[in-house]
Every structure is written in structure tokens, then in C-alpha cells.
Image: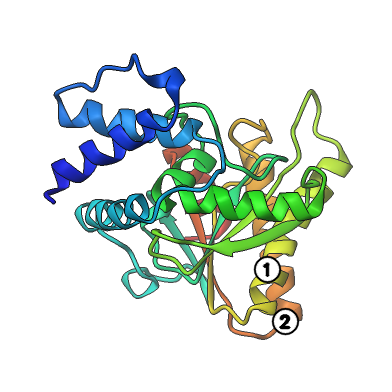
Amino acid sequence: MTQQERLFYLITYLIKENSELSAIDIPAEEAERKRLLRSLMNIRPPKTVSNEFLDVQETYLQEELTRKGTVSISDLTPVQPDIYLWQGDITRLCADAIVNAANSTLLGCFVPCHGCIDNAIHSAAGVELRLECSRIMEKQKGKEPAGKAKITKAYHLPCRYVLHTVGPVIRGQVTPKDCALLSDCYRSCLQLAAAYQLKSIAFCCISTGEFHFPNEKAAEIAIQTVKDFKAANQNGLEVIFNVFKDSDFEIYRRLLGQ
């Protein structure tokens, strides 16, 4: 199959498995087809899928990753010992683990092509990530509390693992409890990385998007929590602060003294 044929196959499969989607017209333009595929993956519930679909998806997503290009720690310059700052798409990073700012269902974002990092990570990882998260939540029998972390495989991402953590949702003024919970998110991920003997971890800006934690305060908490953990655990864990927005890059650059 060509990449175009794989794209058409994946779209057709996802439409056929849901009778409510039968009226969807597949657009002719490649960009629109890619957007439709992502939308279909976003709304798909965690259920079994054929091995043929998984094989085609694997080749398709790997080709898309090759087109985007990957970034490894060796491509970056530390701003402090074992601490890096990088602006870009976290789904391109080759760290041992990347951190996903998840919601309490831990199943990813179901809003088609939503701009959150949860959506981006699940879309790039493939449908298997939602399936694994679903198995975790079935065993847990309850929503994921804020401040904790879970680990899954990364599937078609260039990293090895994804660490999922739920940050505090801000409604009104930020409270000391909110700050403590955000710090817990970073600490839980660091502890999980240490438990799995990972050598590198890339953090997104947890809670600052849809959860409305003030960006400056969130960055202060993130940096301090990481520094405190590294001081108490001399394990050489490399930490990347990954940002997407220019405003967050400027905040982290200033706070890290770059």
C-alpha cells in the first residue's frame, strides 16, 4: 500500500465499524482526509480492532512520524545540569517517557481534533493507547484522582512510555491545595520514572491549558518540584520541560536562568 492507500483504508475501516458514521463523505484532499482520520480515532471508543487495521495503522503512523522528524536529548543543550528546555511537538521526542496531561477518565480526549495535548498524544500513539488506558481504568473501578500518575506503553510514539497524570482544575483563585496537587503530579511522574529506571522524562505544562492553572505559577511549581526531587534522588534522571507556546517558553527560559 502507498501512504494514501493506508489513509483511505483506515478511514474506511473506522466508518464501517460504526453504522452511525455511514453518511460521512471522504474528502478528496489529503489534509482533509488526515483531519477526518484523526477525528474518527478521537471519537472511537476503546474496543477490539482487527490485526489488519493495527498493521496498516502502524505503517501509516510510522511514516507520518518519519515525515515530522524526531528529536532526541542529544539534539538539545541543557539549561542546567540534566535539565532541558525545548519548544515543540512533544509527540516527536525520543525521551524514555513523555508526560500526558490527562483527564480523570484517563481515556484521552474524545473531541475531534481538539488542541489539547491529551488529544495529540493519543492521536499519534494510535488506538492501542486508549485500549490500554481502558484496561487500567476497568481494574481501578473509579476515576483517576488528581496528583497521581499511571504508566502505559507509547505504541507508535518515538518515546518508550507515556506517563498520564491528572492536574488540578482551577475555578477562581488558585488555592494552596491546587498548588500541592500540581506538585504531586510532577512528583508522581518522577517517582514512577525512577521506579521503572527510566533515564529521561519530558514534561508538558500540566494543568495550564483547559484546566486554567496560571502559567507562571505552574512553571514555578514544576521547576521547584523537579529540583527538589533531583536533590533528594541522585539518579541522573534527565528532565525536559517541553513547551508549545511562545509565552511558556519565555516563562521557563527566565525561571531556569537560560
Q: Which mark is residue 19?
A: none
Q: How is the image coloured?
A: rainbow
> In this figure, which residue is indicated by the disc labeled 2?
233
**Position of residue 180 measured from the top left corner of the image (x, y, whole percent):** 83, 50
Q: Position of residue 218 (x, y in %)?
A: 67, 45
Indicate the amino acid at tag 2. Answer: Asn
Residue 107 position, x and y percent, is 62, 43
Residue 255 image-quadrant placement: bottom right
> Circle 1 is placed at which residue position?
190
Instruction: Tell me the element at label 2.
Output: loop
Which residue of the protein is positioned furthest toward the top in this rendering? 23
- Seen at 49% across and 35% down, the residue is 44
**How many labels, in total?**
2
Mark 1 / mark 2, whichever is N-terminal: 1
**Res. 55 image quadrant:** bottom left
Side of 219 relative to 174 (left or right): left
Q: Is residue 69 above or below residue 74?
A: above
From the viewer's side, name the closer residue of 234 and 6.
6
Residue type indicated by callout 1: Leu
Which mark is in front, 1 or 2?
1
Whether residue 92 is visible here, answered yes or no, is yes
Percent of width and height locating residue 93: 39, 61
Q: For the residues marked 1 and 2, what is the alpha-carbon distance in whole angstroms?
A: 10 Å
> At 78% across and 52% down in the image, what residue appears?
147
Disc 1 to disc 2: CB gap under 8 Å: yes
Tell me: residue 112, above or below residue 106: above
Considering the numbered disc 1 on the image, is that residue within a helix, a strand or a loop?
helix
**Is residue 249 visible to the viewer in this orientation of the structure?**
no
Q: Is residue 102 above or below residue 161?
A: above
Circle 2: is it few (<14), some (14-19), or many (20+) Cα within 10 Å?
A: few
Q: Quadrant of residue 234?
A: bottom right
- Foreground residue among 9 and 243: 9
